[in-house]
């Protein structure tokens, strides 16, 4: 089963792989929502824009979301006020509120058919002990000048103890929206190349060379829109973020349409959002979150958890879709948007959207566009990408550093000797053969696939993901299939392969 957004989209645009050296004003690496929105804004201003992506449009993170367009990013505003002050919290809130309006304006102006609907968003709880947390959040949001409401009734198929309602939010079909953006970019004389992997970016005099497998792009400006920056230095974003995996199922409820979008206030996380697909009422249920690369993750703690919840709520439901996704989580809960590094002028980044990429991608696109055009953006201070303030979330820092320290050097990990024949079909793990650590996967036919289980990003030891049959990095979230082929950044190189 694949993402509903991918399976339900007919792509009516032909994209090609980069086949020659080119020059432009702005080279954008990554054709997700952030990259395409930035290209859209800049091409409308008359700049010569080239977008490069290693995959097809919408097949990665942007096509595996729940697609909630909201400024209600969980319980965050009281935290922002306490951690950064009222001014930053207010900028964060209204930057995302403006992003909602911007998306609606793009859809209307460009006549993009992407199933955009207006609806309210809710953060709810079924636990009376969490009511005070919700009420404090309501006070915090209202103090910033936004009219949210505390309610005790929702359209969820169960009773809640309370919920915070944000009015005038939206949802849409993200891949249809992205294809619409692509058409606009092409109509504005921009260029988009898919299946084009970028290996490096080099500064030469007053321009950059973006290097792919066989060709390069020369440009004054570069925008890193690759979800997780694959350039490690001098930005050091790998020290400030980790990746989290979450799971989504799509069910035909066989019942009435759910009104509104919902997410739990505290763990365990359950997210609900409905999609009307012809005569079907498809409900997207999300949850099962864990740090990418974590050990001992099972089907029972991920997809099965969501399937059980679906059957509890809708006994006659039919499972239609299931997929998972990765999100970049910043240690201080705020995205990094703007200049990549003071040492690399005219290179920009947008990353760490913390699961809220629909609005955050538009915020990032506007800030980066203004930077390139020499305009002061009124919200950029809240998202400064080069910020070096003390991290408030010190517990997460300790966890990240502990995981990185235990994974960076293979020799530090003790792995007992194993016999290859003891590995069951469909399983994988790291074993030791002649003193070498080798990642082994035994497929359903008993064929073995061996790789060097060391991430090609920064050398962390990989973990086996038995749900997706992938090798995942616990440090920064890179992923590889069982044959060692890179699937997700920040790594861009494949794993070394062993012949057994």
Image (cartoon, helix red, strand yellow):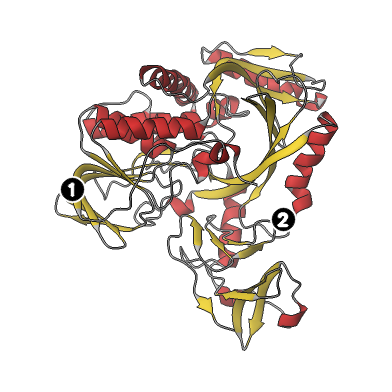
Viewer-side residue, 48 vs 455:
48
Judge depth for marks 2 and 1 and give the one in front: 1
Where disc 1 sits, the SS reads strand
Horizontally, is 4 left or right of 421 in the view? left
Q: Earlier in the sequence, mark 2 or mark 1?
A: 1
Rendering coords of residue 242 (x, y %): 54, 50
Q: Which residue is mark 2?
A: 297
Q: Is residue 379 left or right of residue 353?
A: left
Is residue 448 placed above or below 259 in the rendered structure? below
Q: Position of residue 4 (x, y in %)?
A: 60, 38
- Label 2 SS: loop
Residue 272 % position (x, y): 68, 29
**Residue placed furthest toward the left:** 205
The residue positioned 38% from the left and 38% from the top of the image is 13
**Which residue occupies 49% across, 61% down?**
486
Residue lying farthest bottom?
Answer: 434
> Which picture quadrant has residue 319?
top right
Instruction: Determine whether label 2 and label 1 are within 8 Å by CB.
Output: no
Q: Give the spatial CA distance, label 2 vs label 1.
A: 46 Å
In this view of the protein, which residue sits in the foreground, 491 or 131? 491
Q: Is residue 426 visible?
A: yes
Q: Which residue is mark 1?
A: 23
**Considering only vertical position in the picture, is 35 above or below 230?**
above
Q: Residues within 10 Å of mark 2 (few under 14, many from 20)?
A: some
Q: Which mark is residue 383?
A: none
- Dot 1: within a 10 Å radius of its alpha carbon, few (fewer than 14), some, or many (20 or more) residues? some
Measured as percent of width and height from the top left, residue 142 is found at 57, 13
Q: Is residue 386 left or right of residue 250?
A: left
In which quadrant will I find the C terminus?
bottom right
């Amino acid at each position: 089963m694949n993402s509903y957004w991918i399976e339900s989209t007919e792509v009516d645009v032909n994209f090609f792989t980069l086949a020659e050296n080119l020059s432009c004003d702005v080279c954008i690496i990554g054709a997700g929502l952030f990259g395409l929105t930035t290209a859209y804004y800049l091409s409308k201003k008359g700049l010569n824009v080239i977008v490069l992506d290693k995959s097809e449009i919408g097949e990665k993170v942007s096509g595996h979301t729940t697609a909630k367009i909201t400024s209600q990013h969980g319980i965050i505003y009281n935290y922002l006020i306490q951690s950064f002050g009222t001014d930053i919290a207010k900028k964060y809130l209204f930057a995302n509120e403006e992003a909602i309006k911007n998306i609606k304006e793009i859809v209307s102006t460009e006549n993009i058919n992407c199933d955009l609907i207006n609806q309210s968003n809710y953060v709810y709880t079924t636990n009376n002990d969490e009511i005070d947390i919700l009420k404090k959040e309501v006070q915090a949001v209202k103090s910033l000048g936004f009219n949210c409401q505390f309610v005790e009734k929702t359209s969820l198929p169960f009773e809640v103890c309370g919920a915070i309602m944000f009015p005038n939010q939206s949802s849409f079909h993200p891949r249809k929206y992205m294809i619409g953006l692509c058409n606009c970019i092409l109509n504005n004389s921009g260029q988009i190349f898919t299946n084009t992997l970028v290996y490096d970016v080099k500064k030469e005099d007053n321009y950059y060379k973006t290097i792919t497998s066989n060709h390069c792009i020369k440009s004054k400006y570069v925008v890193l829109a690759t979800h997780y920056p694959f350039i490690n230095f001098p930005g050091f974003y790998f020290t400030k973020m980790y990746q989290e995996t979450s799971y989504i199922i799509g069910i035909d409820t066989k019942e009435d349409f759910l009104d509104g979008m919902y997410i739990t206030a505290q763990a365990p996380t359950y997210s609900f959002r409905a999609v009307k697909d012809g005569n079907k009422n498809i409900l997207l249920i999300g949850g099962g979150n864990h740090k990418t690369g974590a050990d001992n993750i099972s089907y029972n703690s991920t997809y099965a958890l969501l399937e059980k919840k679906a059957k509890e709520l809708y006994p006659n439901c039919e499972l239609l879709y299931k997929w998972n996704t990765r999100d970049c989580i910043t240690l201080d809960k705020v995205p990094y948007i703007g200049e990549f590094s003071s040492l690399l002028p005219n290179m920009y980044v947008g990353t760490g959207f913390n699961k809220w990429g629909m609005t955050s991608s538009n915020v990032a696109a506007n800030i980066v566009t203004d930077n390139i055009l020499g305009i002061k953006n009124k919200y950029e201070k809240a998202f400064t990408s080069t910020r070096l303030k003390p991290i408030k979330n010190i517990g997460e820092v300790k966890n990240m550093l502990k995981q990185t320290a235990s994974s960076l050097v293979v020799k530090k990990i003790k792995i007992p000797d194993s016999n290859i024949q003891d590995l069951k079909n469909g399983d994988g793990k790291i074993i030791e053969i002649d003193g070498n650590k080798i990642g082994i996967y035994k497929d359903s036919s008993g064929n073995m696939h061996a790789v060097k289980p060391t991430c090609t990003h920064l050398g962390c030891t990989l973990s086996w993901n038995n749900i997706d049959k992938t090798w995942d990095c616990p440090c920064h979230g890179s992923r590889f299939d069982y044959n060692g082929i890179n699937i997700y950044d920040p790594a861009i190189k494949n794993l070394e392969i062993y012949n057994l």
